[in-house]
Amino acid sequence: MNALELHSVCKSYGAHRALDNINLSVPTGSRTVIVGPSGSGKTTLLRMIAGFEFPDAGRLSLNGQTLVDATHEVPAHQRQIGYVPQDGALFPHMTVAANIGFGLAVKGQEKRERIAQLMDSVALEANMAERWPHELSGGQQQRVALARALAQQPRLMLLDEPFSALDTGLRAAMRKLVARLLADAGVTTILVTHDQSEALSFADQLAVMRDGRLVQSGHPLDLYRHPSDEQTALFLGDAVVMPARIEAGWAHCDLGRIPVNNHRNNRCAQIMLRPEQLQLVSILPSVAEPTGCRAVVTERDFSGNTCTLTVELEPLPSADQPGRSLLVRSSGLYAPPTGSAVHVSTIGHAHVLSEP
Ligand SMILES: Nc1ncnc2c1ncn2[C@@H]1O[C@H](COP(=O)(O)OP(=O)(O)OP(=O)(O)O)[C@@H](O)[C@H]1O
Ligand SMILES: [Mg+2]
């Protein structure tokens, strides 16, 4: 069953269309992640679901209850929706404990215990309870905002870049912790992030926004493998995009013949491969030639467990231009050095992109 449904939602600020005909279903208990370039409408969408913005047209419902349509509007405080805004927005005149306990119905010792539990659940030390928001780091403020939203036991949780102020290690740990907390509580969640790996690892459903429109949504693996167009492909990670002639389920391109997953015959199109679908084998004079195209490694970007290489394909004898440059993701430890001659082969299918 779907918890949240958005039907044809539109919102303009003056002449600017911030949300353009958004349709989205968020299944109960799921984690939906929204990604998109800055200004694409992500925060506007969350604020509308929370009840702080109102659509010009369209309908929103939660668990079958209409939140807003042309004739009807449930105010924000009656929606039971937790919202952690992009800047945390803590009450500056209240301590950490008072911020977290703001909407708690219980009092006295029970309230203190609940606040302590909530602080513990977002990895905030107990001795921070009496600090003021301006005495906290950005990441600590984000965790207080998260605890304050969790305290409300919401039906739906909206998180607008809640981990952006945390360092990489803490960010990954918090992401896991919050995912577990929300799953244990069975809270349906929508998260906005700029971080590709966060989006791909946190989401059950990923939605990509651009210019106020929802351009694609689905399972993260499906979007990563089958993005609708080049911009979406590049938004979710590195991509190798090149022209090809598609014929009988095969793409004929500078890398030779590669099977495609979504073919329309006899046409020229752009195809996409992820850099980890390219494999390099060093060319050693003493060993028989492996199969694949010949190339030279021109750049190496070592980042620990992986290494991103740029290779330049050997130009075809008839060509008057240098060979195509491609990105290849290789193991960090065993990547061939710059200048070495390699053979490039591919694994899996290429994906045919739609026309821009
Ligand atoms: N209150 C407002 N008045 C006028 N324009 C607004 C208002 N709020 C947002 N906008 C505009 O609507 C568009 C979408 O803004 P929004 O804040 O939703 O983007 P975003 O995707 O969250 O961006 P970011 O990733 O930078 O947070 C932007 O062009 C923004 O300037
Ligand atoms: Mg935003």
Image (cartoon, helix red, strand yellow):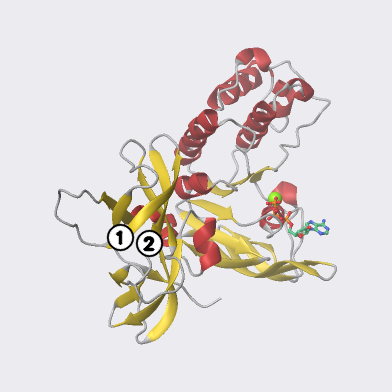
Say whether disc 1 or disc 2 marks the residue closer to the N-terminus. Answer: 1
Q: Does the CB distance between marks 1 and 2 fall below 8 Å?
A: yes
Residue on which the image places disc 2: 313
Q: Position of residue 110 (x, y in %)?
A: 62, 19
Q: Secondary structure at mark 1?
A: strand
* Quarter of image, res 96: top right
- Distance from the alpha carbon under mark 1 to that under mark 2: 6 Å
279 on left or right of 24: left
Q: Position of residue 104 (x, y in %)?
A: 68, 30
Give the residue furthest to the bottom: 266
Q: Position of residue 234 (x, y in %)?
A: 52, 59
Residue drawn at x 52%, y 78% is 355
Residue on which the image places disc 1: 294
Residue drawn at x 36%, y 38% is 332
In-front residue for pair 14/126: 14
Residue 136 visible somewhere in the drawing? yes
92 on left or right of 114: right
273 vs 269: above or below: above
* Quarter of image, res 224: bottom left
Residue drawn at x 48%, y 69% is 228
Q: Residues within 10 Å of mark 1 (few under 14, many from 20)?
A: many
Q: Secondary structure at mark 2?
A: strand
Q: Residues within 10 Å of mark 2 (few under 14, many from 20)?
A: many
68 vs 153: above or below: below
Q: Position of residue 319 (x, y in %)?
A: 41, 74
**Amino acid type of the residue tagged 1 in the rendering:** Arg
Residue 4 visible somewhere in the drawing? no
**Amino acid type of the residue tagged 2 in the rendering:** Leu
In-front residue for pair 281/64: 281
